[in-house]
Each structure stands twice: as C-alpha cells, then as structure tokens.
DNA sequence: GGCATTCTTGGTAGCGCTACCATTCCAGCC
DNA sequence: GGCTGGAATGGTAGCGCTACCAAGAATGCC
C-alpha cells in the first residue's frame, strides 16, 4: 500500500513542517535578497567583506522579514557561543550585584549574552557550574575570587577562552585578574583606627569567605605591628552577613571584651548593625567606640554618625573585566594581566575622635 | 596531481578535524555503549522508555567519557532552549535581587539555565531584550511588572511559552502573574500612620516607577478618605532611589511643609535616609515624625528606632513564578493564573507614638 | 597579452542533537 | 496459527548556521 511513485518523492519535497514557529531563517533572507546564504551570514558578521551594493539589499531583506539570527544555530556551527559566563558567590550581596551590573552595562551593546551563576560560596557548586558553563563553549569566563579548587582551576585553564578572576588580585592568575588587595584594605582600615587613637580594636566578621579572611589577615598584621593583637578581640562566624547579625556579633564581642574601643568590620552591613546597637545602648560613636566598615556602600556617608569605610571600585571591576576579556577575544591580550584597581579609605565621623 | 585513488576517500573518512576541542559527543557515547545514538538521547531525556539494561550501559559510558550534552545542539534540534528568560529593571535594587535569587534557587537543580536581562526601567530596553530573548525560544519568560508597552506585550503573547509577570497583580495577565497589590500596600501603610495619630503625613518617593506610582495612589486614597490630603505633602523625583537621596528629599519636604509629622516612603532606602537625617537634625522619631518604609529589608528591624515597613515576599515571588512556569511547561497550567502573595505591615518603633 | 593576485561570491558539508518514522520483537488474543 | 498492539530500538533527515574550499571577476604587473 502507498506504493504509488509519488509517495516517496513527496516526502522529500516537503521539507517537514517548520518545527519552530516559522520564523524567517537566514536562507529566507538570502532568497529574498537574491544572494547565497553564506553571503548573508557574512554581511552580518564581517560586513566589510561584502560589497556595498549587496549589503544594502541584504539589510533591507532582513528588515522586511524581521529576521533575527538564531544564537543556538550560530553557536553550534561555529563551536563558539556569544556568551560570557559569570560566576559570583551571591546575587543579593550588594558588592557582587554591582560587579554584575558593571558587566551587564559593558556588554549591553555587544552581541554577547551573559550566563550568570550563583555559587552560594561553595567550591563544589562552583565546579558544577563551571562544568555546565563549559559545555556551552563561552566566549569568556568571569569568576569571583582567586581561591578556586584544583578541579575548578583545571576547568578554567582548559576552558579555551579568556578567563578573568575578579574582586581580588593575587600572584598566580589563571589568565587575567582585576581587583584589589583585601589584605591591604584590612591593614589600612586597622591602621587608621590605631592612628586615630583606638587601642582595643576588635575585628568583627560574618561569612568569613577567603576575601574576609584576608581582610582579617591585614587586621592582624596592623595590630601585631602596633603590639595590640589579642585573639579575644576577634569575633567571626560563618553565618551569612546581615545588619541584624552585626548587632548580635557586636554584643558577643562586647561580652567577651567589655573594654573594646574600636571595631573593624568585615563589611558595611555589620558596621551598620553595630552603629544601630550603639545607638540603642547609648554607646557614643566615635568617642567610646570607633567603627570602620568595608566596601563603602553609599549609605555609609549619610549614616549618623557617618561611617568610615574602605571604598572599593566594584562597578569598575566589572567593566574592566569585560574590557580585558573583550580585548583578549579580539586577539590583543592586554600585556598587563593583573590589574589592581586599589581602594580608598573614606575617613568619616565614626572614627573622628 | 593528488589523483591517486585514496585522496578522495581519505577526505571522506577523516570527519574534518573536530571544530570544538574534541569533547565527546552523543554518538561517541552511543558507540561505546554499543547502541544507537537516538537511544542515548532517549536514555537522557525519557529514561523510562529505555530498558534497564541499556540504561545502565549508557550511563556507564557517559560517566567514563565525561560526556556533557551540548545545550546549543539540543536547542537547535528541538527548537526549544532549556532557558528561562528573566527581565528585571535593576540588578542592584535589593528587591529584584531577591526575586532573582528565588528564581535561581528554584532552578538550580533543573536542567534550565537562566538568561537575565536588565531593562534599566526602560520600556524600550525591555522591548529590545524581549526581542533578543525571543530569538532563543526560551522555555519560559519571567518579567517584572505589569506595565509592558504594547509592543512588549505582543512579543510576550507571541513568545510561544509560559509567561509570568511578577511583583504585581493586576486584572489582565499576559499569561500568569505573581505579586501583590502595591496600591493596597500604600494604602495600608498610610492608614497605619493615620491610626497612629499622625496627620500631616508626607509621601516621599524616588524613582517613581509604576509600582511606586501605585503605592502613591494608595497613599492618596487613604489620605483623601481621612480628609488629610494636601498636594504639598507629596515629594517625588524620577532620580534613582538611594539612602543619600532619602535625606535630600526629606529636607525638601520639610522645607515645603515644616509641620510634617509623618512620612510614608516609597521604599526602605528612602526611609533609612530620613531616619539618619532625623538623628542628625535631632528630630525625634516617632514623637515628632513617624516613618514608614516599604519592602522591609532586614535592617529595618534593627535600625534605631526600628522602622515600620510593609513586608513583601520577594524571594517567594521568585520561587512561585518558577513553580507556575514549570507547571505550565509540563502541561498542567495552574487554574489560578493570578497569585496574590500579599504583604504584611510590620509595626515598629518608628510609628509607636 | 598573459599570468599572478586579490576581491567577491557561492556551494557543500557538517556542528551535535532530536523529530519522525520504520523496524523488530514479543505478549496476548480470537 | 495468524494477527493485532505495544514496547524497545534504530535510521534518516534535518534544525539554522558557519568553516572550508572553489570559482569567477576584477585588478595589477611584467
């Protein structure tokens, strides 16, 4: 049955109903413009290699049909997706949100999409995401931090694309780095408290990720040098950071060491929690206690009293990372592979004794 | 030249050097497991349709080769990418960051990736991103807000996938909605101030996006009903919201209306800026001025005095949006297409007169 | 004028995967 | 015993695009 001659041919002729909603494809454009498909492809990707004349025709056809290239087909054919993979440990932490914003803003006018991953501060999760991202053959990878697990590091090295580690600088980049020294930041903050005349200076830190650990190391160095270091001055917890937690930790620290006269905080959330607790307990800032934060969120300058903090250039880190990756993609890898954007001590009322 | 018989055949045999770094493909797995390629594909996507025996062999081969499916090829062949498109107006606004976090957390164990877009509160940018996202044939779209332009709305309707509008509820969903009524939130906040005995209650708002407009509308309703409405009580600006801006706006409001005795703020950042300014100017909160914020960031409860705010369920909105989209994808579209997650008035010291 | 060289354009063959259909095999039934 | 129906498996033909190679046209040079 169905052995009549046309059946087989018919099946060949009908190109199978368009699976996707029938959106125009590159060859639709080519047909309309009266050129070969490959020429349309070129007109889109390397316009200078197509004659003025044809380019206009092709652009007109694209306009008329409302053609939009299929990124999946493009990625499959070229074995390279126009995607930046971005890995951050948190989406709600304002610091990373700003880095991500810098990345998005820098890439919004480019053909590149962004694949954002949240590692939840977990090395294992980072490995998993790197695996997933790698399967997409991204154009570049931007990862937060420099403390990748050996597995992650290998994945990054074999990614076959530019890699930028952000937020920190360090001695041994996988490829490129943009950030600053958290250790120096911690040292500077602590130094400032010491110079302002504080002596029993505590370190209070939540979510002690590697960057916080290095801030703590900077604190230790400064305190040690001044002969002020006392382990009881240090209060940390792995619990995620928040303003309410700052209050709790400050109470703990005070209970442990009632003569505390200054605190260098892990970050501004903690600092703010401490400030509020000082208000509540009628502890005078900066007279009785000096407070220094880290990151300098914009609320620090309007807090009352305004809070001294280490200003970090988060947005700029994101932008710079993209700029470096883009340069590497287009062939001229920047000769300076590790960029230190530094930080700035913002002296404010909370340490103006 | 090169006319010896093997030349042509050789070119056929050698499958052209692997364009991509030679990672294993589905047919490598199939060969290793001694089955057809399609069976491997099925074992991955519909395991129950493959016999126990083969499934084990295939899984072993996958393990051994370290095979990872290529999402681009998959998307191209099936005309459907395993991608959720997510559009938010801001990446740094804590509120949207929490929604996005909810979405990521809900999707982290699924095969779905997330394509995040930042509209910068611009309708035009939203249209552009919708166009771009649409070209990827996403599995679902999640967009913030209900005030899409007609073009955006059409793009959403023709997206050919589940669409969830989040953050707000409204009468006319494109497809599904999860959120709450900002108008009711504004009304409740204002009502609370009135009941607490405040009379010259100002509205202070920055970045007056549609949601803020509706909060303002709620404020108007409550004030009007109480016979307290006076246009000079309202201070707004299109400038992006921030804590420092809250301080500025409060000063403006006070200059305009020195007898102000309460403020309902657009959001918690503004409220915090006002609180700080009150401290600085020695204005007693809640005695001289009552303050109500919106969103209830966790710092509100530890501020001194703690700040009354409207608690919104941002994280939950993200999770719910994903749950609804996932249900729709798997065929059983939830019968309740508009989900109101409500809000909660958190009474605190800042309005405890 | 002949020939090499560059510029433009096109054809062909996949990229890695899945939709569609075909085939095989076996249980269950009249 | 033959037939139906379903389950398990496989082959084939693309999805929409680009890499690679080839060919023709235009240009330059001796």
Image (cartoon, coloured by chain):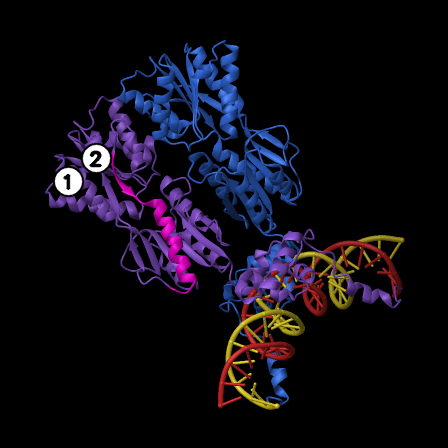
Chain colours: A blue, B purple, C red, D yellow
- Relative to B276, does residue B47 appear above or below in the rendering? below
**Numbered tag placed on residue A28 in the rendering:** none
Task: Residue A143: name its quadrant.
Answer: top right
Residue interval drawn in magenta: B308-332
Residue that carries the numbered disc 1 in the rendered image: B230
Residue that carries the numbered disc 2 in the rendered image: B263
Camera-side residue of B333 and A18: B333
- Relative to B350, does residue B209 appear above or below in the rendering? below
User: Residue A127 vs residue A311: left or right?
Assistant: right
Quadrant containing the N terminus of chain B is bottom right
x%, y% of residue B209?
31, 46
Instruction: Find the distance from the CA under tag 2 to the CA under tag 1.
Output: 13 Å
Residue at the image position 19 percent from the left and 45 percent from the top: B187
Report if residue B312 lies within the magenta region. Answer: yes
- Asked if one can make out residue A324 in the rendered structure from this viewpoint, the answer is no
- Asked if one can make out residue A94 in the rendered structure from this viewpoint, the answer is yes
Report if residue A304 lies within the magenta region. Answer: no
- Relative to A339, does residue B48 appear above or below in the rendering? below
x%, y% of residue B225?
12, 46
């Amino acid at each position: 049955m169905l052995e009549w001659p046309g059946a087989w041919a018919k099946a060949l002729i009908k190109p199978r109903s368009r699976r996707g909603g029938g959106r125009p494809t590159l060859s639709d454009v080519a047909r309309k413009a009266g050129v070969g498909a490959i020429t349309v492809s070129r007109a889109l990707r390397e316009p200078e290699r197509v004659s003025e004349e044809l380019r206009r025709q092709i652009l007109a056809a694209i306009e008329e049909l409302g053609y939009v290239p299929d990124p999946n087909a493009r990625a499959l054919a070229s074995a390279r997706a126009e995607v930046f993979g971005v890995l951050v440990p948190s989406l709600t932490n304002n610091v990373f949100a700003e880095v991500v914003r810098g990345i998005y803003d820098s890439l919004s006018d480019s053909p590149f999409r962004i694949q954002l991953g949240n590692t939840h501060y977990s090395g294992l999760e980072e490995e998993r995401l790197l695996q997933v991202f790698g399967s997409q053959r991204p154009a570049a990878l931007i990862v937060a931090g420099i403390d990748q697990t050996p597995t992650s590091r290998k994945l990054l090295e074999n990614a076959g694309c530019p890699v930028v580690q952000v937020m920190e600088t360090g001695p041994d980049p996988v490829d490129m780095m943009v950030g600053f020294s958290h250790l120096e930041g911690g040292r500077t903050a602590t130094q400032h408290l010491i110079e302002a005349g504080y002596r029993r200076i505590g370190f209070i830190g939540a979510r002690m990720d590697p960057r916080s650990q290095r801030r703590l190391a900077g604190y230790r160095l400064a305190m040690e040098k001044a002969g002020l270091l006392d382990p009881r001055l240090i209060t940390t917890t792995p619990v995620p950071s928040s303003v309410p937690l700052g209050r709790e930790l400050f109470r703990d620290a005070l209970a442990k060491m009632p003569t505390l006269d200054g605190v260098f905080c892990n970050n501004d959330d903690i600092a703010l929690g401490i400030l509020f607790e000082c208000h509540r307990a009628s502890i005078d800032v900066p007279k009785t206690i000096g407070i220094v934060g880290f990151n300098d969120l914009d609320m620090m300058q309007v807090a009352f009293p305004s809070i001294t903090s280490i200003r970090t250039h988060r947005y700029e880190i994101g932008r710079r990372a993209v700029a470096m990756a883009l340069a590497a993609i287009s062939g001229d890898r920047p000769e300076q592979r590790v960029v230190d954007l530094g930080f700035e001590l913002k002296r404010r009322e909370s340490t103006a004794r």
